[in-house]
Image (tube, helix red, strand yellow):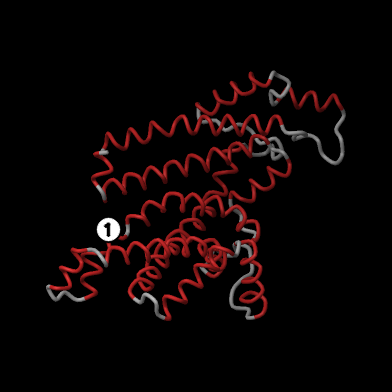
Amino acid sequence: MLAYALKRLLSTIPVLWIAITACFFILRLAPGGPFDGERPLPQAIKDNLAAHYNLDKPLIEQYLIYIGNVLKGDLGPSFINQDFNVAEQLLSGLPYTLTLGTSAFVFAVLAGILAGIAGALYKNSLPDYLLGLFILLGLVVPNFLVAPILQLVFGLQLDWLPVGGWGDGSIAFLVLPVVVLALPHIARISRLMRGALIEVLNSNYIRTARSKGLSRTRIVVRHALKPALMPVVSYLGPAAGFLLTGSVIVETIFGLPGIGRYFINAALNRDYGMVLGTVIFYMVLIVVLNLIVDILYAWLDPRVRTQ
């Protein structure tokens, strides 16, 4: 298992390098710059700023300097918010983003698995039809449309939940963002779980278990659940990545003080350092999550390690 994990870890290094390189050159080659505001600066000041941030050097030299700093663990300065560097801003927003993403991930996994089990056990009945409708809505309707609808209904009209902000950090401020962020993944997980469980329940060894007089609950829990979870487990890595990156939009809509706020502001202001730092942070996090899922998948199915 350790050799398999090390092999998977080493294979991610070229992916990270290619992604960082692509993001660096795309940002640098795009028109405009971090100091091209509505009120133009005097040319002398722009030259001094360019020299301070190494923007006056050839592009390939800028790239080598940046890669060298990243290898040392330095994500560089923020071009706009000069009071804090990129790492400090990311660390300040990280607790909020992780709280939102982790809560949405746990909620999506639990609700998706339970909904998928219900759909498989009550196939072609009213619960299954309702599940199909929910899956369709969850996959089709984007979260930036669901969010204002929920804010209008539960926040303004019913006055049950706050419409935005972090407040005192209570659960009430997290309910709507978590639901909005988790809905499409609940739909996908429930669809995967339903299809896999139906296939497993029609297998020969499940028929043998039924012939021995085992109850349906014991058959599902003891014999069918683990193999049916395989497609769901394979989806958890991308799902966790989607939840964390998707939180950028949700944080902006609900006014949460997470990393998404810094990323949106940096993208609008062409803050090279902050945009690249956020992209690197998300890439490393997604790679780590996918590595964990690969190890979990190999633990559930030893044939993966053998192959």
Task: Where is residue 82? Give x, y as percent.
Answer: 69, 37
The answer to which quarter of the image holds residue 191 is bottom left
Q: Position of residue 133 (x, y in %)?
A: 51, 73
Residue at figure coordinates x 38%, y 35% from the top left: 9
Residue wearing tag 1: 227
* Image quarter of residue 290: top left
Q: Amino acid at mark 1?
A: Pro
Q: Does 14 sit left or right of 217 as displayed?
A: right
Give the x, y percent position of residue 234: 38, 51
Q: Secondary structure at mark 1?
A: helix
* Mark 1 nearby-residue class (10 Å; few <14, some 14–19, many ≥20): some
The residue that appears at 32% across and 55% down in the rendered structure is 230
- Give coordinates of residue 117: x percent, y percent: 35, 70
Between residue 300 and residue 70, name the one nearer to us: 300
The quadrant of the image that shows the C terminus is top left
Please tell me in which quadrant of the rendered image residue 151 appears: bottom right
- Residue at position x 36%, y 36% in the image: 8
Q: Residue at x 51, y 52 (%)?
A: 242
Q: Is residue 165 above or below residue 66?
A: below
Q: Is residue 58 above or below residue 301?
A: above
Residue farthest toward the left in the current orientation of the protein: 212
For the N terminus, the quadrant is top left
Numbered-mark total = 1
> Along the horizontal axis of the image, is 139 left or right of 108?
right
